[in-house]
Image: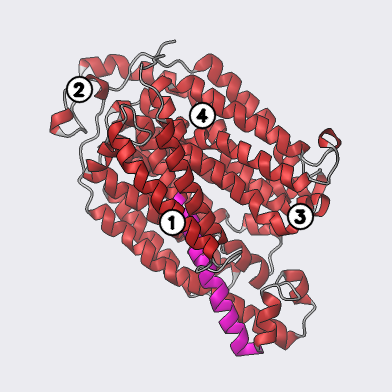
Amino acid sequence: MTEIEAETVPGRRREVMLVLPGLMLAMILAMLDNMIVGTAMPRIVGELGGLAHLSWVVTAYVLGTTVSTPIWGKIGDLYGRKNIFLWSIAIFMVGSALCGMAGSAMFGGTADGMAELIGFRALQGLGAGGLMVNAMAIIGDLVPPRERGRYQGIMAAMMSLAMIAGPLVGGFITDHLNWRWAFYVNLPIGAVAFVLLVFRLNLPKHRTEHRIDWLGAALLSVGITALVLITTWGGNEYDWTSWQILGLAALAVVSLALFIPVQRRVAEPIMPLHVFRDRNFTLISGVGFLLGFAMFGAINFLPLFQQTVQGASATNSGLLLLPMMAAAMAVSLFVGQAITRTGKYKIFPVVGGVLMAVAMWLLSLQDVHTSSLQTGLFIAVLGLGMGGLMQTTMLIAQNSVEQKDLGVASSASTFFRSIGGSFGVSLFGAVFNNQLTANLTDKLGPQAAQMAQGGGGRLDPTSLSHLPAQVRLGFLESLASSISSVFFWAIFFSAAVPVLALLIKEIPLRSGPAAPGAGRPADQADRPQDAAPVAAFD
């Protein structure tokens, strides 16, 4: 370490450790919220009604988050991240409070309670879009790439912890409190994060003379919204060949096609296309998309298998995910420390991708006789793979761009993973439904298949327990086989992750401000914005 580095790194570490609790709390907000709300949904529907619109409670949040993610990242690059981050927390908290009041006397009773909740969830999603993006970008502002692994590993571990705690907290709230506390619980957490960051986070304030690319933001938002609606509605609400889905596809194509020339002309594009000229950035964006596609698309079916086939309760199914989350947490911390010590990172997404593919293969072998212990071992392998991938995708994306594009890189990394997850949930949902219909028709006849798909009955643990033993076994075998087929198809997407990761060129990570050119292509080496900030100020 050089003399300059020796003088500045301790101060920078103190600065980061002061703000890290606030950043972690803000990230936990978004992760914890979805897990808690999912557990409380049956009670919400019971009070507000609107079962037919249940999926929109999730879709509205996903839309708000996905649409706003690139915008939050770019606005942070233009106007400084502290105030923008605080605004995102404030919007999330306001949305949470309004969600908790949906259908209450304050809004005139429960007649339109579900519609109110859907609208407020969209507002909550708009705030959530800025939480993770700006938290990671702030770490990038304060810490050079060589040291980011340590802190991003800690934050990835906290994300895993939130995914464990979510179902447990949600189960407690559902059993002992009103469902509205699934949203109100965000308020004290958000308030603590807000106060900590107001007083402890000090970043350079800057404002450019350029205007925000509102046209580009509008085109991107329309295109993303159309894509999310396609993946949400396709094969469920509407047939894939219906005019609604084809019309949305045309809208997405036209919007995104117009988005590209707009980004080339404006002074400050919402998503600068030049960042995709960097080979590593393009490759890691593809890795993030595939990671979201395989991981979120397949994991979505684990609780269904555990609760229906293995007979776990809703709360216990959250506990049964502990091996996966604990493994992801441990590996995230290890990877962060290893990257900081060695400066090497390429091996981790390669190994992580291989482990994820192996886990999907193991999960595809499950059947009605698979024990909870076996499933726990399989998902522990998945957690090991996730731990090697979660923060390295963000680190490589940030290390592939100039400092002025740090927010764009952070938002793009989150954006592609979210879009991949949306596509994965949709595609694997279609695979599951088709396989379940075929399996039930083969084992029990078309009437049973119609019952499972909603034509007069429900395929859930309560209804299955009342069926004759032989019929129940046929349902469980069909369900287990259908879920296994989802994991089988996930193998191919997971296997593509290490292939793309192998093509990444390992560019040395900057270890401090004395190495301004390290970690940048040669033509960018001497640009002043590449030096990581040392002393932050207001």
Q: Which residue is mark 3?
A: 50
Mark 1, secondary structure of its residue: helix
Q: Nearer the viewer, mark 2 or mark 3?
A: 3
Q: Residues within 10 Å of mark 1 (few under 14, many from 20)?
A: few
Q: Residues within 10 Å of mark 2 (few under 14, many from 20)?
A: few
Q: Which residue is mark 4?
A: 23
Figure quadrant of the C terminus: top left
Q: Which residue is mark 2?
A: 527
Counting from the top left corner in percent of width and height, residue 478 is at 60, 80
Residue located at (39% from left, 66% from top):
358
Residue located at (37% from left, 39% from top):
336
Compare marks 1 and 4 and give the one earlier in the sequence: 4
Residue type for callout 4: Leu
Q: Residues within 10 Å of mark 3 (few under 14, many from 20)?
A: some
Q: Residues within 10 Å of mark 4 (few under 14, many from 20)?
A: many
- Please provide the residue range marked out in magenta: 419-444
Residue type for callout 2: Arg
Horizontal side of residue 483 vs 404, given as left or right: right
Q: Which residue is mark 1?
A: 250
